[in-house]
Amino acid sequence: MSSLLRHLYLFVFVLSFCFACGTAEDTESSDLSLEQGQLNSDSMSNLGEIELTQQLPLELDFSNSEKERYRSILGGIYQELTEEDSSYEASDSAADPTASCDRCGRETGFLPSPDLYVNQFLHVDMKSFTFGLVAWDIDLEAIHDVLEILLSNEVPEVIQLSHRLTVVRVDVSRFNETMETQASEGILLSEQSPDSVSITSVTTADSQFGLNLDHGYSYILFVNTVEGISKLSSLASEPVLLHCFTSDENTQGGCLQLNSSQNL
């Protein structure tokens, strides 16, 4: 086995073990009564029998109109889930976070939003999922400047950042025409609680996270950053929209990033 594969093997094993020991947060949208999804859908206990390779570009019969349909549905769900952030962004974001108690203990929108991206997709032979490594960047200098402006002499000596990754798994194949329209208009979750949509969030101090992406589902990923001492947080990042295909007699399964020109 090459040095690269040995490192990938060890990396996936550690991620899988850490996730098994972790506890996912409950989504804030508890009133939606949505079933929480699993970030790891298949057991990785047989890693010794799995060969991980970088996923090759996919040859897919996925028209531009179908891509736009999925982008519209997933984008609408993202907008609905982050609607509170959007309304806050439209208000006076330069206001003093201590001037009101509307968000006491969790003042949102003051830190710069992180940039979320897919770092790598790994094909897992003989499995119905793709391993995805997502990562995010945030401007630490900008965070320090914001804290100095807002907190003055109360700026923490050590800035403690955590990141809340939200994973929304969507089974678009189970949507009827009404659900598709509601999703695209950003009102699906307020009108009904479909079991074809599940939401999971996990908090980490790291700047990357690995998850299993089940073939046959679409995904919305976004991340918020929180400073642990001041409790100031960012708005949600721009989303990463994915669709993962099941294998058939012509193609093997794999994932496509919908808001990017790159197939991974």
Image: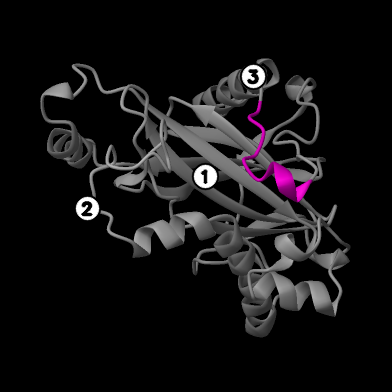
Residue 242, x across and y down, in percent: 62, 58
* Residue 173 in view: yes
Q: From what the image shows, is residue 157 above or below residue 107?
A: above
What secondary structure is marked by label 2?
loop
Determine which quarter of the picture holds residue 69.
bottom right
- Three-letter code for the amino acid on which mark 2 is drawn: Ala
Can you tell which of label 2 and label 1 is closer to the viewer?
2
Q: Is residue 28 magenta?
A: yes
Q: How is the image coloured?
A: one colour
Q: Which residue is mark 1?
A: 120
User: Is tag 2's residue or tag 1's residue first in the polypeptide sequence?
Assistant: 2
Q: Is residue 163 magenta?
A: no
Residue at the far bottom in the pictured view? 65
Q: Which image quadrant: the N terminus? A: top right
- Three-letter code for the amino acid on which mark 1 is drawn: Gln
Residue 32, x across and y down, in percent: 74, 50
- Three-letter code for the amino acid on which mark 3 is drawn: Gly
Q: Residue at position x 29%, y 45% from top?
A: 110
Closest to the observer, 127 or 149:
149
Q: Which residue is mark 2?
A: 94
Determine which quarter of the picture holds residue 99.
top left
Q: Residue at position x 63%, y 82% from top?
A: 64
Q: Which residue is mark 3?
A: 22
Magenta segment range? 24-33
Residue 205, x across and y down, in percent: 43, 25
Relative placement, left or right, of 192 versus 123 is: right
